[in-house]
Amino acid sequence: MSEHVAEISWRRMSPGFSYEEYNRRHVWRFDAGVAVPAAAAPAYRGEPDCVDPEEALVAAIASCHMLTFLAICAKKRIVVDSYEDRAVGRMEQNEAGKLAITRVDLRPKITFGRGAVVEAAALAQLHRRAHEECFIANSVKTEIVVSGPA
């Protein structure tokens, strides 16, 4: 077992506290004091220059998939030179009628090391295994789809 800690700090900066008025900006703090400015999504009166929880969930899913993929490749001695993804999460009503991130599309673009030849079927299998072993994917109900780069 392991524990993972995130500290969240918010202070009211507005004179009042109505839904329209209160500030959404806050700070996430992680290991070694890394601070991330965060807020609600702009659609919910947040600030576009801050990370919102929906984006963070999509990033966590994409990052975990990538790290698991890289670990699998390293163990198989398949050299990866770069991995880029533009993950997209879809928020809509779920089966219970609640808003949720119901789907995340991963579109990784991977460059393998010189001499590494990874056929399409083998690449698909690497992604399947990464999905099966990804801690975050195993923690959410969200459908996660991996396809080629957009």
Image (tube, rainbow, N blue to C red):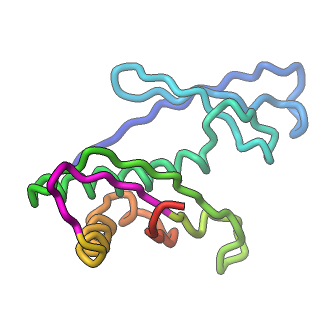
Magenta-span inclusion, residue 115 = yes
- Does 119 appear above or below 9? below
Residue 105: x, y in percent? 52, 65
Q: Quadrant of residue 102?
A: bottom right
**In the displayed structure, does residue 11 sit left or right of residue 112?**
right
Q: Nearer the viewer, residue 140 or 144?
A: 144
Residue 59 to residue 144: above or below? above
Q: How many marks?
A: 0
* Front residue of this view, candidates 41 and 20: 41
In the rendered image, the quadrant that contains the C terminus is bottom right
Q: Residue furthest front?
A: 115
Residue 129 in the image, given as x and y percentages of width and height: 25, 70
Report the residue at 51% width, 68% height from top: 142
Secondary structure mostly seen in magenta is loop
Residue 116 in the image: state x and y as whole percent: 17, 58
Q: Is residue 95 above or below residue 84?
A: below
Q: Is residue 120 left or right of residue 106?
A: left
Q: Is residue 61 magenta?
A: no
- Report the residue at 65% width, 80% height from top: 95
Nearest the camera: 1 or 34?
Answer: 34
Name which residue lies at 44% across and 35% down: 6
The boundaries of the magenta stretch are: 106-118
